[in-house]
Image (cartoon, rainbow, N blue to C red):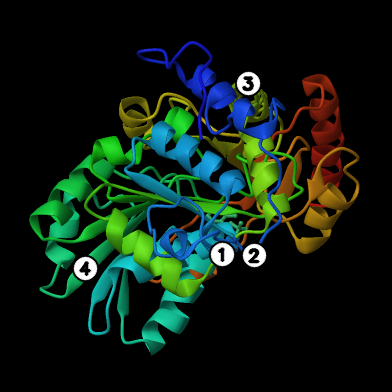
């Protein structure tokens, strides 16, 4: 699925992989991009062909050149044996979990996990006889004490959703490996450009492709990548669940991947600049950004990540609902909305404390999550300045 004119460079840089992998113009009449293959039926000319399971594409549900190109590219970026697309980030998470657990198993999930992941664990997984226990995201090697003979998987999300704790993945993976449990990491924030969990001992990596991979808020997708050890189980679960991705969404993932490196660089710089600026604003108690030295887990960030994402948290002096409404309703550039990863800036009041069961999260004020897009920084600052003034007037 990949053509490097003149052969594959020995060690292509990430930017080169992003621009050249997963497409093969010679197989597409010379057109640069692999089109959205719209297809269910694949026809076989002979009985021999029908019986030949080495044929790359046999049925639409199992993938097309549109999906395979992306899967190949993400495998290369994550250092994985294989990757599969799912119709959403949540579908990727449920697929990864279902690939490794059985009735009677027990799994350990970070207390800082994306809330719908928790809902799946406490809902459908519980119904299927899998027990979930939540652990402190900062537990590190201490996770050992939570293991039982039935612990089959550990779910890591670093940084945590809305709260941005960084997890000591190598320490957790070392314990899990010794106890025969799979480590699954949600790597949506950093993307494989800035963090490669498989190299740090993880077994499966999931992405909400909806966010940074697509990058334009116009499609849903997810991916799961696995080591050689876990690839057969992942491929089997994907086949049995039938979580196929539509060709247009897959095409938009491929389109987004081409600019991922330059977008991530911009998101990183802008998010950091805005985070730094916010720390000195009146009414701001603190900014929660793993790449800032004042983040409590900054050492882990420095050790395990080579860059940071578009999302961070900001804690304002505790304010009533009326102040929060005055702040966010009057913003002209920041929109409120779930999801993130697009070119447009977003803000969301974060209400996460009530979902925790293993730890307490006390921001010490009113917490907001910010996704920094590509508007001019000065315009974003002016928008937030005015918003913060409205907030403070109502304290
Ligand atoms: C959004 C998100 C998901 C889920 O992705 P969807 O495509 O919305 O299902 C999973 N993990 C994290 C960290 C997310 O932010």
Q: Position of residue 363 (x, y in %)?
A: 53, 52
Q: Position of residue 19 (x, y in %)?
A: 59, 22
Asked if the residues shown at circle 1 and circle 2 are in contact, with their CB atoms under 8 angstroms apart, the answer is yes
| Circle 2 or circle 3, nearest the eye | 2
The residues tagged by marks 2 and 3 sit, at their Cα atoms, a distance apart of 35 Å
Asked if the residues shown at circle 4 and circle 1 are in contact, with their CB atoms under 8 angstroms apart, the answer is no
| Circle 4 or circle 1, nearest the eye | 1
| Circle 3 or circle 1, nearest the eye | 1
Q: Compared to 247, does 17 lie above or below?
A: above
Q: Which residue is mark 4?
A: 152
Q: Residue at x 25, y 37 (%)?
A: 200
Q: Residue at x 79, y 27 (%)?
A: 381
Residue 298 position by quadrant: top left
Dot 2 or dot 3, earlier in sequence? 2
Query: Can I make out residue 110 in this image?
Result: no
Q: Position of residue 142 (x, y in %)?
A: 17, 54
Q: Which residue is mark 3?
A: 262
Dot 4 or dot 1, earlier in sequence? 1
Q: Which residue is mark 1?
A: 61
Tell me the element at label 4: strand
Q: In the image, which disc is placed on residue 40? A: 2
């Amino acid at each position: 699925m990949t053509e490097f004119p003149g052969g594959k460079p020995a060690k292509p840089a990430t930017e080169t992989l992003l621009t050249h992998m997963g497409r093969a113009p010679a197989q597409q009449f010379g057109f640069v991009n692999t089109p959205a293959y719209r297809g269910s039926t694949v026809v076989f000319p002979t009985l021999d062909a029908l019986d030949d399971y080495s044929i790359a594409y046999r049925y639409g549900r199992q993938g097309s050149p549109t999906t395979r190109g992306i899967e190949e590219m993400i495998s290369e970026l994550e250092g994985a044996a294989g990757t599969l697309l799912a119709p959403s980030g949540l579908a990727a998470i449920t697929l990864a979990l279902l690939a490794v657990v059985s009735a009677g198993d027990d799994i350990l999930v970070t207390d800082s996990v994306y809330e719908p992941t928790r809902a799946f664990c406490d809902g459908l997984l519980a119904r299927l006889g899998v027990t979930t226990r939540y652990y402190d995201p900062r537990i590190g090697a201490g996770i050992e004490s939570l293991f039982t003979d039935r612990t089959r998987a550990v779910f890591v999300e670093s940084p945590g959703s809305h709260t941005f704790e960084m997890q000591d993945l190598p320490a957790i993976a070392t314990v899990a490996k010794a106890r025969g449990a799979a480590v699954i990491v949600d790597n949506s924030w950093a993307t494989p450009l800035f963090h490669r969990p498989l190299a740090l001992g993880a077994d499966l990596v999931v992405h909400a492709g909806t966010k940074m991979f697509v990058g334009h808020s116009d499609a849903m997708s997810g991916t799961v990548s696995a080591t050689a050890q876990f690839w057969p189980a992942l491929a089997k679960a994907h086949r049995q669940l039938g979580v196929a991705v539509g060709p247009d969404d897959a095409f938009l993932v491929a389109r987004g991947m081409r600019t991922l490196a330059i977008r991530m660089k911009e998101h990183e710089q802008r998010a950091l600049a805005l985070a730094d600026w916010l720390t000195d604003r009146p009414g701001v108690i603190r900014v929660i950004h793993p790449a800032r030295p004042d983040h409590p887990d900054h050492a882990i960030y420095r050790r395990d990540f080579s860059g940071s994402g578009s999302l961070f948290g900001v804690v304002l002096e505790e304010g009533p609902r009326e102040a929060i409404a005055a702040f966010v309703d009057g913003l002209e550039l920041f929109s409120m909305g779930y999801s993130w990863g697009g070119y447009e800036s977003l803000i969301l009041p974060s209400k996460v404390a009530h979902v925790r069961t293993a730890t307490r999260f006390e921001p010490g004020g009113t917490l907001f999550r910010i996704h920094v897009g590509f508007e001019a920084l000065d315009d974003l600052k002016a928008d937030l300045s005015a918003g913060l003034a409205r907030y403070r007037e109502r304290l």
